Image: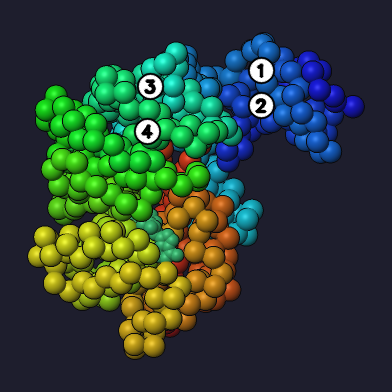
Amino acid sequence: MLKKNDIITLEITSLTSEGSGVGRYDGMAVFVPFSAPGDKLKCRILKVKSSYAYGKIEEIVSPSADRVPQDCPVYGKCGGCSLRHISYSAQLKYKQQAVYDAFTRIGKLTPEFLPIIENDSPDRYRNKLQMPAGERDGSTVFGFYAFHSHRIIPCDDCRLQPEIFSAIVKRLSALTDEYNIPVYSEETKRGALRHVYLRKGHYSGEICLCIVSAVDLPAYRKTAARLAEEFPAITSAVLNINPDDTNVILGEQEITLYGKPDITDTMCGRTVSVAPKAFYQVNTPTAEKIYRQAAEFARAEGKVILDLYCGAGTIGLSMADRAKKLIGVEIIPDAVENARRNAAANGITNAEFICADAGEAAKLLRSRGEHPDVIVIDPPRKGCGQAAAEQIAAFGAERLVMISCNPATAARDCAYFEQLGYKTEKVRAADMFSHTAHVECVVLMEGKNNLGEKSNES
Ligand code: SAH
């Protein structure tokens, strides 16, 4: 029987959806983070449960052919990447497999699986950074929370972020020291500075600096002005006030410290502005590839499109010029405001945006007599769920296109839609978040009545 601190020899045979390696020992699954399928390891057992155990690498006896040298000083500590030790081509293979497994095992579905959409730039691809502030030896440091903890791991230059973010964060920590801005403490609930949040327009280069603080201090104005002077790419600086004892990063109140509050960028050739609180895809070029795949699945020419969970409207707007009409639904008011202005900025006059819960809006739109032909569904990680799926299916649209950052909930929701009259026809994985275990997917579901008509026609 395995017990804590045992050292065992283990061969890693697969990866979990969280990116941990797994091997079998005495009929038990042993999870070993930062291992790779094909590794032969000496592994120390850290925790034993009834049918599985957790371990950590003591020694790599013989490495997997997928391994590559590690190139980041905080890899394994910062809570961000979990696949950096695996070659990019192998990461793609495992992510494609994870999407296949989710749809076949969780969804019990048998769609056609298209080859994974690759990330052309597996490093420095993020356009958004969020770092908590901490204190080391009396100075402000920014970093990332260690896995499953709120312990800050300082990080000078995250390889997933543009280099300019590292330079801005370095100056911000020096300026907050110079102006004696106290760091907020989660233990004592005292202090001010909580997080830095940066967002950069991939094509425009415009940067929004958002400082999150428990309280407003006059020194933030001087800090923002000096940073904007030193980094002309900073076109907006915002102070977000979050006094609450919470894990949620952004608070309600926002004060513009410099410039305009939103950044403007381009996506699929459309001009888009996004407020700090509005969702914006963090990897613009790969998101554009996903949107193009979604448009291909949607075949929206001359159709009425309903874009649910639309954020600042980017997906629907990328299809709207070919469509008869676009209706977008989003729950965050700032994002809806952005979506309306983005439609106007691109001369799109056939679009309407509603601020509401997706399921509630579906009900309301049906009572208004709307008949969308194509429904785009891009929910957060928890998926749309059964109740919203029922409301969505009740429209009887020709087809549904789902975009998801969580294949497990996507597969579950597609299984609901299968019972509600939609066949999952095609699934395509996409790698937006290289070096992390996250994987996106785009799904085409066709109405079964519609499929029936097609076969009658032929
Ligand atoms: N389609 C957009 C946003 C996708 S992220 C894009 O590609 O940029 C998911 C979006 O769903 C977020 O903007 C989030 O605010 C919104 N959201 C979360 N829960 C929701 C709900 N219950 N109803 C409507 N929108 C919701």
Measuring 44% from the left and 13% from the top, which residue is drawn there? 137
Residues marked 1 and 2 touching at CB (< 8 Å): yes
Residue 10 in sight from this viewpoint = yes
Q: Position of residue 355 (x, y in %)?
A: 33, 69
Residue 193 marker:
4
Measuring 19% from the left and 41% from the top, which residue is drawn there? 257
Q: Secondary structure at mark 1?
A: strand
Q: Secondary structure at mark 4?
A: strand
Quickly name the residue at label 1. Answer: 57
Q: Name the residue type under label 1.
A: Ile
Q: Quadrant of residue 128?
A: top left
The first of marks 1 and 2 along the sequence is 2
Q: What separation in Å lies between label 1 and label 4 (alpha carbons)?
A: 37 Å
Q: Name the residue type under label 4.
A: Leu
**Of labels 1 and 4, the one closer to you:** 4
**Of labels 3 and 1, the one closer to you:** 3
Measuring 38% from the left and 21% from the top, which residue is drawn there? 140
Residues marked 2 and 4 touching at CB (< 8 Å): no
Is residue 351 rendered to the left or right of residue 453? Answer: left
Q: Name the residue type under label 3.
A: Thr
The first of marks 2 and 4 along the sequence is 2
Q: Position of residue 175 (x, y in %)?
A: 26, 22
Residues marked 4 and 3 touching at CB (< 8 Å): yes
Q: Name the residue type under label 2.
A: Val
Q: Please say if 333 is above or below 81.
A: below
**On the rendered image, what quadrant is the C terminus found in?**
bottom left
Q: Position of residue 393 (x, y in %)?
A: 47, 76
Q: Counting other residues with Cα less than 10 Å from the Cα at mark 3, is it few (<14), some (14-19), or many (20 or more)?
A: many
Q: Secondary structure at mark 3?
A: strand
The first of marks 4 and 3 along the sequence is 3
**On the rendered image, what quadrant is the N terminus found in?**
top right
Q: What separation in Å lies between label 3 and label 1 (alpha carbons)?
A: 33 Å
